[in-house]
């Protein structure tokens, strides 16, 4: 199993998380051992740190941020620069999890050379440890593998193909579509993909593909028989402001928590109960200067500055 021990960074052991770095070869070993792979999306430092400290194996900086973070109606609008920005933030937080970056629509749909160049940016500029691309693009996967860039494939319901598919619809429901999907998965494996996300397909089809491949499959709306599962962070905690898809299980209600906290804060401000005297800083009583003094102590109180220094420590 290919792992690297941490020498610096957050002490994840206090959360009961093994201090070993997850790598692409480690995911393959998890499949061989029959150990399920946990994966979640994250888009910023705070959520990535929570996900990593919880022991999630793979963090995907998904182009779903176009919808759940930036408010677009689909994933197509997000740019390479926006994805790089968010990937950098996630990488700063993730100590153990494998960080995978989604390559956004348009970043690999032209020439192979352009696709490789954009993938290099994610690794070199943002610290991604793998990139994810949608569709059976075997030539690109082969080129990325030769360029030493690990690749996660993505088949089934591919959100960047929303217009061609006519919406977010379950895929692989006919014999011909199933054959194409299986062929695409085998082709991606031969081209060098290290794992494949299977989205929005019947459980039986995902199970058959998972059994055929030596590389891990990670399901989202593909049933429980994949080697791992992934969900969008905002769906998991009810921050997506949309009805949940059939495959989503909500494990918390952050929207209700945040709404309650924000409402209580507003009410306290309106009633002048925040901040309280205990939440305010004071000059030490014994150092209050006489009102008629005109020296440095009448302008600046050194003790008060030291107290306020809590805000501005370097």
Image (tube, grey):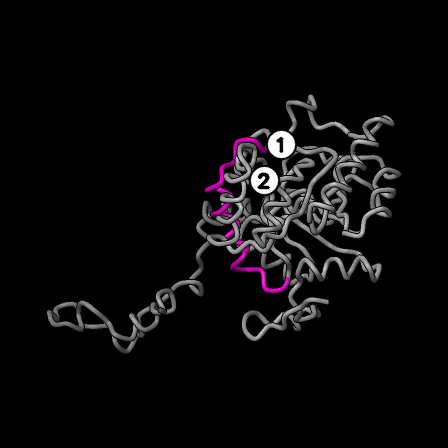
Q: Residues within 10 Å of mark 2 (few under 14, many from 20)?
A: many
Residue 68 in the image: above or below residue 35: above
Question: What is the span of residues highlighted in magenta in the rendered image?
Answer: 75-96
Q: Give the camera-side residue of 197 and 46.
A: 197
Q: Image point 64% across, 44% down: which residue?
A: 141
At a point 78% along the width and 39% down the height, the residue shown is: 221
**Which x, y percent locates residue 122?**
51, 49
Q: Is residue 193 magenta?
A: no
Is disc 2 placed on a helix, strand or loop? Answer: loop
Q: Is residue 77 above or below residue 272?
A: above
Look at mark 2 in the image and give the residue it sits on: 63
Q: Position of residue 78 (x, y in %)?
A: 52, 36
Which badge, 2 or 1, is on the more N-terminal residue? 2
| In the image: residue 127, left or right of residue 228 | left
Quadrant position of the N terminus in the picture: bottom right
Q: Is residue 94 magenta?
A: yes
Contact flag, marks 2 and 1 (Cβ < 8 Å): yes
Residue 187: horizontal and vertical position, in percent? 74, 41
Residue 22 x, y percent position in the rendering = 67, 62
Split into 4 quadrants, where in the image is the C terminus? bottom left
- Asked whether 139 or 122 is in front, the reply is 139
Q: At 68% across and 43% down in the image, what residue appears?
A: 153
8, above or below 39, in the image: below
Instruction: Identify the residue under disc 1.
Output: 160
- Residue drawn at (53%, 46%) of the image: 119
Q: How far is mark 2 from mark 1, CA to CA?
A: 9 Å
């Amino acid at each position: 199993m290919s792992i690297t021990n941490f020498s610096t960074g957050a002490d994840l052991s206090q959360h009961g998380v093994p201090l070993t770095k997850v790598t692409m070869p480690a995911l393959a070993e998890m499949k061989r051992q029959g150990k399920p792979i946990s994966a979640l999306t994250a888009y910023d430092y705070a959520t990535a740190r929570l996900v990593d400290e919880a022991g999630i194996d793979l963090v995907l900086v998904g182009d779903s941020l176009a919808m759940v973070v930036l408010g677009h109606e689909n994933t197509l609008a997000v740019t390479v620069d926006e994805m790089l920005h968010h990937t950098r933030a996630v990488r700063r937080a993730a100590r153990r999890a494998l960080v995978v970056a989604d390559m956004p629509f348009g970043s690999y749909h032209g020439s192979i050379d352009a696709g490789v160049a954009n993938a290099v940016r994610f690794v070199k500029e943002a610290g991604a440890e793998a990139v994810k691309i949608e569709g059976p693009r075997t030539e690109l996967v082969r080129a990325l593998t030769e360029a030493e860039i690990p690749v996660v494939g993505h088949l089934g319901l591919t959100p960047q193909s929303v217009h061609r598919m006519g919406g977010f619809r379950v895929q692989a429901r006919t014999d011909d579509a199933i054959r194409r999907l299986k062929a695409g998965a085998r082709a991606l494996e031969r081209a060098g993909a290290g794992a494949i996300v299977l989205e929005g397909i019947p459980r039986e089809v995902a199970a058959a593909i998972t059994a055929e491949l030596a590389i891990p499959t990670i399901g989202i709306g593909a049933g429980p028989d994949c080697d791992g599962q992934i969900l969008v962070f905002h769906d998991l905690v009810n921050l997506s402001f949309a009805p949940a898809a059939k495959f989503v299980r909500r494990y918390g209600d952050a929207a209700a928590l945040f709404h309650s906290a924000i409402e209580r804060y507003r009410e306290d401000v309106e009633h002048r109960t925040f901040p309280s005297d205990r939440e305010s800083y004071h000059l030490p009583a014994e150092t209050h200067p006489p009102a008629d003094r005109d020296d440095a102590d009448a302008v600046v109180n050194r003790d008060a500055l030291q107290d306020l220094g809590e805000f501005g420590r370097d």
